[in-house]
Amino acid sequence: MEIEVSEDIEKDDIVFYSVLYSTVTVVFGMAVLSKFFTNEFRFGFRSFLSLVVLFLGEPLCQFFIKGPGGLVVFAVGCLFVYSILPASHLPADNKTVFITGCDSGFGHALVQKLDSIGMRVFAGFLEKDGIGAVELRNKCSDRLTCLQLDVTNSRDIEAAAVLIQQAVGEEGLWGLVNNAGVWYFTELEMTSEKILRRVMEVNLFGAVNVTKSVLPLIRKSKGRIINITSLLGRLTLEGVGAYSMSKHALLAYSNTLRQEMRKWGIHVAIVEPGAFRTGSTNEHLLRKRQTEVWETLDAETQATYGSEYLASIYSHLITVSQSFPSDLTPAVRCIRSALLSMQPRACYPTGKGEELVICLHPFLPVWLADRIMASFGLLPRHLKPSALL
């Protein structure tokens, strides 16, 4: 009789814990689905981990740990996975954002995305009546305002800030995305002061000056500032020294600004894209950059390296850049999350394996890190400057 009672109690326990496990599973599953629907993140490590917990976590805990201990382990596992998923987003339809560098690339794609979700967008163009601006006017709603904006021109910056202030009034500006940038592929000895200053003026001082011009408006709304840096702002490669220097500096500026703006309720984030195929990698523009680099060199440096060396480098770069991913969605998704997430991050690495590279690189011996980076370099090993031939 006692054995039968014991068996009945054990069966009741199994049913009781099965109900509790099922309840936790359903709640966790619904929470994960809501994240997918509201945050547009694709299948990746975090979503894979969610599926593992859903389909393997419950039976493993229920049959191997058993009792309340197994239920607690399963529930804690669900909470941990849920905590690393993207946070829900704020409503977008009552917010205004200012984006620089919208002629092509990330800025161009971002304008379309933010306009499509109901945000009011002020888009800065190097050529307000250029192809990129005309295309966006045709594709976007009347919420889009196109601005003439060379981020190295103080009058353009001031005019844009005044126009935005008149439009947003006391409501303020919710977001600023400093996206405008320029890069040249050239070794440091071949980088003239003119080219170096050009890169710094656009990538660093342009972002600093635009930010200062609209910071009072962002303070009113306790909004967001997003600076587009680069993986090359942390790591360096041969041939992109000037670009890396500017992005290193922008990274330092962003980290300092994040700390200083916290007291005002303003969040500052960086988005760090890896290699993508954008307007800056098309053959016509790269050949133009090649000509600019060569024409700014002194006679001695020209003789040392030779025009054929520079031309071969750019030919190789044009070929390699065709293999870069052309889908800009990952970067656009990160910028949108930085603008609208209820729990925004300070840093958004964008690209396959980029987070792992950023984490591991500082711990590698310098000689090993240099060899690894050289294997990813864009300078072909077989090419030699004229002085070495």
Image: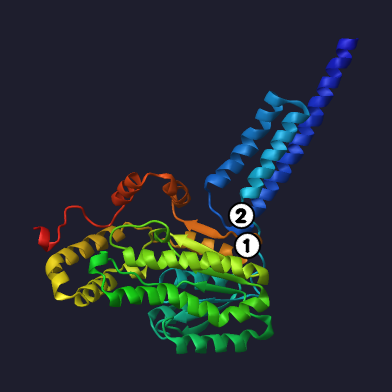
Q: Is residue 120 visible?
A: yes
Q: Marks 2/1: CA distance?
A: 8 Å
Mark 1 Cα-neighbour bin, 10 Å: few <14, some 14–19, many ≥20: some
- Residue type at mark 1? Ser
In-front residue for pair 24/239: 239
> Residue 330 placed where, x, y %?
48, 59
Residue 9: percent from left, percent from top? 86, 21
- Image coordinates for residue 46, horizontal then vertical, percent: 57, 46
What residue is pinned by disc 1?
A: 341
Q: Quadrant of residue 244?
A: bottom left
Which is more toward the observer, 365 or 116?
365
Q: Is residue 43 above or below residue 347?
A: above
* Nearer to us in this view, 62 or 273: 273
Residue at figure coordinates x 65%, y 62% from the top left: 89
Quarter occupied by the C terminus: bottom left
What scheme was used to colour the molecule?
rainbow
Question: Which residue reaches farthest right?
Answer: 1
In the displayed structure image, the side of residue 320 where residue 70 appears, left or right? right
Side of 370 relative to 150 (left or right): left
Circle 1 SS class = loop
Q: Residues within 10 Å of mark 2 (few under 14, many from 20)?
A: many
Evaluate if marks 2 and 1 touch, with contact meaning CB atoms under 8 Å apart.
yes
The residue at the point 20 percent across, 52 percent down is 381
2 or 1: tag closer to the N-terminus: 2
Q: Residue furthest left?
A: 389
Q: Which residue is mark 2?
A: 86
- Disc 2 marks which amino acid? Pro
Quarter of the figure with the N terminus? top right
